[in-house]
Amino acid sequence: MNVAIMGYGTIGSGVAEILEQNSQQIRQASGQPVELKYVLDLRDFPDSPVADRVVHDFGIIENDPDVQVVVEAMGGLNPSYPFVKACLLAGKHVVTSNKALVAAYGTELLELARQKQVNFFFEASVGGGIPIIRPLYRCLAGEKLQEITGILNGTTNYILTKMDKEGASFESALKEAQALGYAEQNPEADVEGHDTCRKIAILTAMATGREVDYQEIHTEGITRITDMDFRYADRLGASVKLFGTSRMEGDQVHACVVPVMIGKDHPLYSVSDVYNGILVKGNMLGTSMFYGSGAGKLPTASAVVADIIEAVQNRDRNVALGWSGDRLSIGAMDTMEFRYFVRAAGSCTEGKDLVESHFGPAEYVCLGDAGEFAFLTGKMKEGDFKEKAVAFETAWKDSHPEGILQMIRAEL
Ligand code: HSE
């Protein structure tokens, strides 16, 4: 079997490296040799081990009947979408690490793969090297899934960990993540939560078998999280993580991407640095957790190579996976329930009565030196919290016009 790699960046070069280094293992698992025939890129790589296989014309791959599996590692939607579509139409299996592509065009590409009796695999698109897509459609196939909550972005987890444990600035931690090859070309996709949004959309579609429009998912990033939040979190024995969450109750599905304050007893608390962790709750299984390297060259490429092997093993048939074009409607964010960590101007002594009259019983954190205090509400719907917060600020504004300084959902 011959493979072509489109895009010789971080992931594409990692795939070439693994195909070479682990060729014996891959041959054994596939039942036949797997050769890298072409690498498509705009650039030349004269000093690389693939120098003699670099091509610049996609048509060479599309029209070569000896290429049976194509790896898409270009990222973005253009030209990856037309190229992937053309490969499937040409009867080639496609393996991708591109979550933007899967979230935007997965329904169409999965259907095309079914029609052409080939495969469209995307294990590496969520959780980097962590097996999560295949467990969902294989090992958990008999489960009714109720919740998926994950730290799904290595870059933001790396940044939050550095801010929490080392007091690093947001900017310096982001630069390190970029240097380590974790961040997207435009890191806004990481830090504004868009990458996590596409990943939780893919997992939700896998779990429900229905199409999810990622644009319906309420998405916040980590750019508003400050060192002051970590000072309070520290006092609470907690940390702040960026969660992608999907809660499924019957036909009702809620999903969001938000920073969440969690305590040491939360299973995702110890998921640090570039690691990702994904909790999956099924009606029979209960909760299981998937953990590992969520980004980076070789971990992500490892998942791509596993998909290549799966494609070789199923070269003449389409493996049933994914979702249909039946669109799932995502419930309104206002109906999701959380506890809320709130920082407000003033002091605990001044604010307590007003907090309790608006939000009900709360827990307080007073640092004592900051002209502000923090409280943790009980669990309530987001819409209710917003109404209470407006009323609280209105009552508080004469003496403390700054009002509420921060709100972070909490699972404490
Ligand atoms: N930028 C992504 C991350 C890469 O940091 O998780 C892996 O999808």
Image (tube, grey):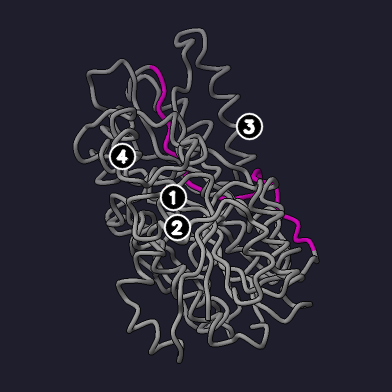
Q: Is residue 280 magenta?
A: no
Residues under labels 3 and 4: Cα distance?
43 Å
Please name the residue that numbered disc 1 is placed on: 9
Q: Secondary structure at mark 3?
A: helix
- The quarter of the picture where residue 226 lies is top left
Task: Residue 320: tell me if it is visible.
Answer: yes
* Nearest to the observer: residue 53 or residue 397: 53
Q: Is residue 329 magenta?
A: yes
Query: Which callout, 3 or 4, points at the residue further toward the start of the chain?
Result: 4
Q: Disc number at residue 387?
A: 3
Residues under labels 3 and 2: Cα distance?
49 Å
Question: Which of the two discs, 3 and 1, sits closer to the camera?
Answer: 1
Residues under labels 4 and 2: Cα distance?
17 Å
Q: Secondary structure at mark 1?
A: loop
- Which segment did they paint magenta? 327-345
Q: Residues within 10 Å of mark 4 (few under 14, many from 20)?
A: few
Can you say whether 128 is above or below 113 in the image?
Answer: above
Q: Amino acid at mark 1?
A: Gly
Q: Residue at x 33, y 27 (%)?
A: 171
Question: Which of the two discs, 3 and 2, sits closer to the camera?
Answer: 2
Can you say whether 1 is above or below 246 in the image?
Answer: below
Query: Which callout, 1 or 4, points at the residue further toward the start of the chain?
Result: 1
Query: Which callout, 3 or 1, points at the residue further toward the start of the chain?
Result: 1
User: Where does residue 364 sit, x and y in percent of width and height?
Assistant: 33, 35
